[in-house]
């Protein structure tokens, strides 16, 4: 398993499950039976009573379920983390944003991963701004630094116009859909 840790990506990590081909079912009759677990019943079948019990027991159980079943584990350590700006444009999006393409090299032991991040920051803002991060599970054209393909999937221009920064990388860069790794 590859170990990757990026403070920038702490909660938005390892969407490898979304990179897999999806089978869509539009027929309700083919939907199997499933009952969601009770939100206020802990895994030991005891009812959660009060905020402290929620924070101490049930919330961590639910977060662990998301880690195991949806997002993947956030790696706890790495040996090396390098950031290299590979391309930049201070007049991106018709001058409304500065753009940087950043190669992020994350290594642990003999394994490493290159994550290619594209970042747009509004040029009108004079102080740091919050950023939205997309882990792109669709075509790389959606998040191209050139913005030659505009997509509602990643409305970067809309985000920039609202005064926020926007960044994206391909899911397969961080978590290749490879059962061998």
Image: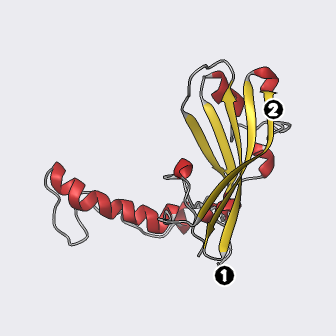
How many numbered circles does the render carry?
Answer: 2
- The local crowd at label 1, few if under 14, some if 14 to 19, many if 20 or more residues have their Cα within 10 Å, is few
Give how far across and how far down residue 116 sits, in percent.
Answer: 73, 52
Q: Nearer the viewer, residue 4 or 43?
A: 4
If the image is split into quadrants, where does the N terminus sit? Answer: bottom right
Q: Is residue 43 above or below residue 174?
A: below
**Mark 1 highlights which residue?**
180
Instruction: Name the foreground residue: 76 vs 109.
Output: 109
Question: Residue at 66% across / 81% down in the picture?
Answer: 180
| Residue 179, placed above or below residue 153 | below
User: Where residue 170 sits in the image (x, y, percent)?
Assistant: 70, 54
- Farthest-out residue, left: 49
Residue drawn at 13 percent across, 55 percent down: 49
Q: Earlier in the sequence, mark 2 or mark 1?
A: 2
Q: Quadrant of residue 14?
A: bottom right
Left or right: 28 in relation to 105: left
Residue marked by disc 2: 89
């Amino acid at each position: 398993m590859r170990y990757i840790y990026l403070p920038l990506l702490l909660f938005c990590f390892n969407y490898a499950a979304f990179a897999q081909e999806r089978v869509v079912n539009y027929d309700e009759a083919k939907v199997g039976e499933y009952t969601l677990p009770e939100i206020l019943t802990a895994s030991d079948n005891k009812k959660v009573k009060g905020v402290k019990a929620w924070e101490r027991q049930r919330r961590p159980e639910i977060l662990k379920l998301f880690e195991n079943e949806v997002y993947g584990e956030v790696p706890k350590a790495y040996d090396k983390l390098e950031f290299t700006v590979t391309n930049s444009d201070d007049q991106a999006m018709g001058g409304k944003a500065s753009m940087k393409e950043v190669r992020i090299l994350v290594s642990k032991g003999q394994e490493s991963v290159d994550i290619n991040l594209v970042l747009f920051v509004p040029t009108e803002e004079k102080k740091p701004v919050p950023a939205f991060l997309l882990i792109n599970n669709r075509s790389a054209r959606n998040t191209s630094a050139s913005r030659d393909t505009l997509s509602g999937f990643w409305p970067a221009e809309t985000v920039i116009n609202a005064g926020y920064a926007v960044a994206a990388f391909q899911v397969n860069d961080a978590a290749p859909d490879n059962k061998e790794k």
